[in-house]
Image: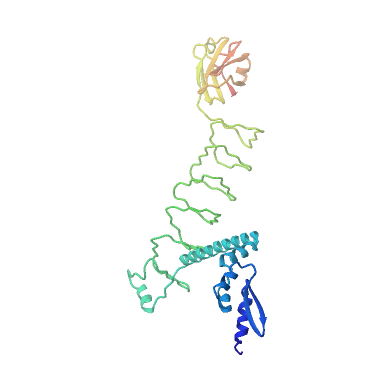
Amino acid sequence: MEDKQPSQQLEDSLLDTPDTVVSASNGSIKASESLDAPNTNKNSQNGLSDSDKIRFVPKIKLVQKFQNKIKNVNIYLLLFIVVLAIASTVLYVNYQNSNKTKDLASINGQELSQEELQKLSSTDQQIGDAKQTLTISSNAVFNGRVLVRENLDVAGTIRVGGALSLPGITVSGTSSFENVQIASNLAITGNTSIQGALTVQQNLTVGGSGNFAGQITAPSISVDRLILNSDLQINRHIDAGGGTPAVSRGGGLGGSGTASLSGTDTAGTVNINFGPGSSPGLLANIAFSTPFSQTPHVVITPVGAACASIDYYINRSTTGFSINANSPGNPSSSCAFDYIAID
């Protein structure tokens, strides 16, 4: 591209100046200041040439240009740009921090040489330090014991072929055990559900209530108090246990008459032998080994004709009962009374 002529350069410079008026006269280009410029006459009075006038034409200051541009900017657009810049900065900082965390969490592995692998087969050899990680890609078999001095983290499943001995175990999730043997105490603070049979070789102590939806099978059950809300079904005999009551003879048995007892507070038999001089009155007095809380129901049945003919009756209380007769018994004869006492 050819260089511009001097006249063309002058014209371009005049066009770039807003306060300059360009006119053409006789084939030459002249420049004069704007009519609004206050120093036009002064410059011409000082004898300035046209080129000097062009040189000293006042320019618009940069501050005024910046202010004019600011007036044309939308304030909401400016706020949006500022918010966008702040959000971008926050995202960038978070991204950098996340990269640092990943770098800290990464484990730097180290490959073992053949010489170091041979050291592993020796006794009491230390390979690497705590900051290094030994990675074994293939399966590993340890013929001897394995001691882990720090925590053991297992990402997969633990399968133990033999016995497992632990001083303490904490299980936070669901666990499934096929056979569990507890040599000492077992303490369960939460609810326990046993789907299969429960076998207790020794004592079972329950501090609270026990609810059983099915049958209870036991060779013997010892309770302090049994409350039945339904009927009682006994498929075999009732064997009433407890202490044996005390018995004493009455004056109606005669001079050499005797009375004896076999049984418990609940049921038993009173044997009576009449002696000479038997008379109506008290035959035998029975004292319970354990008094009842209220006067029990006592039923007696004579055994033999000798006791059936003496017109017998009883008196009862919480501590015992007595057998009486309204007619004398036959001397040198014997009979018995079976009794049942139920509260």
Residue 147 is situated, as x and y percent measured from the top left of the image, at 39, 63
Q: Position of residue 60 (x, y in %)?
A: 59, 68
Rendered position, 253 above or below 238? above
Q: Is residue 196 above or below residue 74?
A: above
- Residue 95 is situated, as x and y percent measured from the top left of the image, at 53, 65
**Residue in front for this viewpoint, 252 or 287:** 287
Comparing 243 with 9, the one in front is 9
Residue at screen point 48% across, 44% down = 202
Q: Residue furthest bottom?
A: 2
Determine whether 210 is above or below 46 in the image. above
Asked whether the viewer can see residue 113, the reply is: yes
For the image, the number of numbered tags is 0
In the shown orientation, is residue 110 left or right of residue 77?
Answer: left
Q: Nearer the viewer, residue 306 or 40?
A: 40
Of 216 and 273, the residue lying toward us: 216
Residue at 53%, 47% (x, y): give it. 199
Q: Decide: is 164 above or below 27.
A: above
The answer to which image quadrant residue 8 occupies is bottom right
At 44% across and 52% down in the image, what residue appears?
168
| Image coloring type | rainbow
